[in-house]
Image: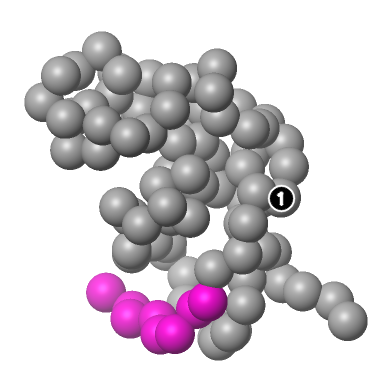
Amino acid sequence: MLMKCVTIYQPWAWLWLHGPKRVENRGWRLAHRGPLAIHAGRRQDKWMRGFYDDPVLHELVPECPPPAGLRYGAIIGVVDIVDCVLL
């Protein structure tokens, strides 16, 4: 059986799998419902590089590992898509 997959840059992928991030913002509608594999991209999101240096941002999700503690370029887990809202 094939499983659908989406690539998400770190640390967003980790945050999706561990609960703090429960919503994904995309410019396209996802018709898929059910299991979806999360692939951590090979690089870190440029916007999030300052996340680890900003104590206010990092305090929101203190359990998020530092960049060296995250996996890159691999399937790191599966989430269950239950809905998609087009904004």
**Farthest residue in the right direction?**
1
Would residue 72 be found to the left or right of residue 45 on screen?
Answer: right
Q: Percent position (x, y) of residue 36?
A: 62, 71
Range covered by the magenta-colored residues = 80-87
Q: Nearer the viewer, residue 48 or 79?
A: 79
Residue, x 52% and y 76% (percent of image)?
A: 80
Vertical placement of residue 13 versus 38, above or below: above
Measuring 25% from the left and 38% from the top, which residue is drawn there?
61
When the figure is inspected, residue 73 is found, relative to residue 24, above or below; the finding is: above
Q: Nearer the viewer, residue 71 or 28?
A: 71
**Image quadrant occupied by the C terminus:** bottom left
Question: The N terminus lies in which quarter of the figure?
Answer: bottom right
Position above or below: 60 against 52: below
Question: Which amino acid, by three-letter code, is at mark 1?
Answer: Ile
Query: Which image quadrant for residue 77?
Result: bottom right
Magenta segment: does it hold 86? yes
| Colour setting | one colour
Q: Position of residue 19 (x, y in %)?
A: 36, 57
Residue 79 appears in which quarter of the rendering? bottom right
Taking the image as shown, residue 45 lies to the left or right of residue 21, namely right
Residue drawn at (71%, 50%) of the image? 75
Of residue 19 and residue 87, the one placed in the foreground of this image is: 19
Direction from residue 31 to residue 22 in the image, left or right: left
**Residue under numbered circle 1:** 75
Magenta part, dominant SS: loop
- 45 relative to 76 in the view: left or right: left
